[in-house]
Image (tube, helix red, strand yellow):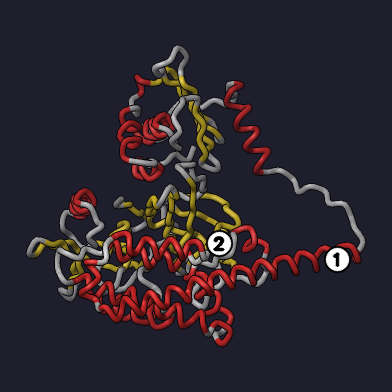
Amino acid sequence: MNYLTDEQVAQLAPDASSLKAGRDLSHEHKWLNFQSNERVLWGEVQGSGKNPYQTQIDLTNTAFKCSCPSRKFPCKHGLGLLFLVAKKNGEIPQITEEPLWVSEWINKRSAKVNKPEPEVEVESLETLSEQAEKQAQAKAKRQEERYLKVQNGIAELELWLKDLAQAGLLALPQKGYAYFERMAARLVDSQATGLAGLVKAFNKLDYFKNDEWQKSALELMSKIYLLIESFKHLEQLPPLIQEEVKSRIGWNIQTKDLLERDDVESLKDHWLVAGRQTTIEEDITIQKNWLYGLKSKRNALVLNFSFKGVGIETPILPGTIAHANLIFYPSHTPLRASIKNYISTIDYLPEPITGLNSWDEVHEKAVEVLAQNPWTDIFPILIEQVHIVFNQGKYYLQDTTQTIVPLSSAVSQEQIWKLLALTAGHSVSLMVLYHFDSVTPLGIINNFAYHLLD
């Protein structure tokens, strides 16, 4: 079987407590039995009840099921079983015949994935034309209603932004949390969730540590103002820039609609899943998967969402290479994508990849990206021969020209220790998220291997 590494399993944990509990269950003596075959892994573990918990994992599409009462996904038992397999390097009992409780579940999943397209009753061309026209009219009406809602929200935001600018940056710390949340809530009601996120970002600034917040606040105000002006002149912009503006405002295309379109970019490649970031905002789990195409040398961002802790099923795993066909959301600088067809996964680089040689080259690339898309605030990039240094209480990454760039404040001490342990202070090739004023290391590339840092 193609087993996952310890690092890859850790990426699946829904929270820190599940991760710890899963590791505690990675010992063979805690399991009554565990087996696998090419498509499914299963095991039984004694819990607090009379009957053992039955845990099973779909190895083809990375899905979980467990008879325990936990509402977390995956639960600690699923994580524990995967950690155990990783610890044993996949050397666990292999049998073809599955228990009934396993085969019933995996067969249903397989049938669902391979379900044939339902037969469609042939209708007359006239009937189909009428239906298509009605659907088009209904869609146009919904779009117009959405446009008016967004327009009203943006008009209110423009007045709010002018008041903010007239009061001056130094008045921001006294505004208080509720001031920004109220404006964000009104934008959500207007279906402009992207703008709501920018307004909420004011509450994430550290107004009391130093004066660096002033630069960040000015950037936020500038991005909001540029979006407002772009929306007001939307019809005068090129079509793909219109799509980008609407997306930044929060007017997104549904994945289902995207997959049905034939005018968007589709790209098949071996995609390095360079890293994953998971955040929770108001009961919504947001999963960001950063991908890098080995042949196309293209970056991609695959977003997944879930509500109130519902598990996210995705075939791509951080630290692996996914052979897949991605379909990109329309934009003049396409980055966000969805998986159109997933083919397979490998855990090694089929060929070496090279990156930029200095932070100066990275900065030049960043300027190009920003010139094309002024709302860009982060993008992944590979830089070679950098090592970690410590200076005046901060950690930096230094290149061969002695130029340094600070690590992002979001990088944990544990990640820094892991980077130091893996590199021993030597220079390595790093995949990083570049934030223009700092970087977040994602993983180390060493010949044909990729080592996650998170």
**Residue identifier under label 2:** 326
Write the residue at 57% across / 26% down: 102
Q: Quadrant of residue 388?
A: bottom left
Write the residue at 56% across / 57% down: 339
Query: What x and y, as percent, mark residue 167?
Result: 26, 78
Give the vertical position of 228 relative to 78 (above or below): below
Q: Is residue 140 left or right of residue 334?
A: right
| Whether residue 35 is visible | no
Residue situated furthest bottom in the rendering: 236
Residue 316 circle label = none
Give the vertical position of 306 relative to 1 (above or below): below
Query: What x and y, as percent, mark residue 392?
Result: 7, 64
Q: Few, some or many C-alpha atoms within 10 Å of disc 2 (few <14, some 14-19, many ≥20)?
A: many
**Residue identifier under label 1:** 130
Query: What x and y, as percent, mark residue 437?
Result: 25, 72
Give amino acid for label 2. Leu
Give amino acid for label 1. Glu
Regarding mark 1 in the picture, which secondary structure is present there? helix
